[in-house]
């Protein structure tokens, strides 16, 4: 066997090692992407749970949200402020989830429950609030929310049936 033959065998081994390394890196990348999506979903779920928990653990806030269903005009000034900031937090959290779905960090199917909750809220209790506050959100999100609200398919998520 000549030195040239040994060199060719060495090149073949190096090429195989490179292919094995690339396959390993592809597997690691896939696992990392999956873990990142899972982590993003978990954080989104926790954020939305905090929004719901604020209502379930604060009777006064729950009363304000129920009152707001009849219109913001029926709320006292301090109730309007509490309602405004609660809605701002709730909708901003969902806007973040919506954007994560656009980026592909969360699969669209995974956010359907969040979507139903927020769009039901905006379609009913928060409709008047949304109309006066939506300029605080991104244009893409405003278009998305308005399109879904106008569809008429979202019912109140505030009062369980």
Image: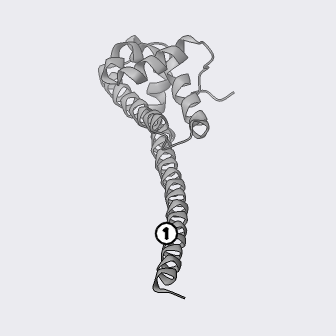
Provide residue 99's location: percent of width, then percent of height. 43, 34
Q: Nearer the viewer, residue 147 or 80?
A: 147
**Quadrant in the rendering for residue 115:** top right
Q: Mark 1 points at which residue?
A: 18
The quadrant of the rendering that contains the C terminus is top right
Label 1 neighbour load within 10 Å: few <14, some 14-19, many 20+ = few
Which quadrant of the structure image shows residue 130?
top left
Q: Which residue is drawn at 60% across and 20% down?
A: 154
Position above or below: 144 against 88: above
Residue 126 in view: no
Which residue extends farthest front?
A: 2
From what the image shows, is residue 105 above or below residue 89? below
Q: Where is residue 10 in the image (x, y as percent from the top left)?
A: 49, 79
State the colouring used for the structure image.
one colour
Image x and y of residue 20, in percent: 55, 69
Residue visible at 59% across and 22% down in the picture: 156
Hey, which quadrant is residue 92 in on the image?
top left
Q: In which quarter of the image is the N terminus?
A: bottom right
Front-most of residues 16 and 58: 16
């Amino acid at each position: 066997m000549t030195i040239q033959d040994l060199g060719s065998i060495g090149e073949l081994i190096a090429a195989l090692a490179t292919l094995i390394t690339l396959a390993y890196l592809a597997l690691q990348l896939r696992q990392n992407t999956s873990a990142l999506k899972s982590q993003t979903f978990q954080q989104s779920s926790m954020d939305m749970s905090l929004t719901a928990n604020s209502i379930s653990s604060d009777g006064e806030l729950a009363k304000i949200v129920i009152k707001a269903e009849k219109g913001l005009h029926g709320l006292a000034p301090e109730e309007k402020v509490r309602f405004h900031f609660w809605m701002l937090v709730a909708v901003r959290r969902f806007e973040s989830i919506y954007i994560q779905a656009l980026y592909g960090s969360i699969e669209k199917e995974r956010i359907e429950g969040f979507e139903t909750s927020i769009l039901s809220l905006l379609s009913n209790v928060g409709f008047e609030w949304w109309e006066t506050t939506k300029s605080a959100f991104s244009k893409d999100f405003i278009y998305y929310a308005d399109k879904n609200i106008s569809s008429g398919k979202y019912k109140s998520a505030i009062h369980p049936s």
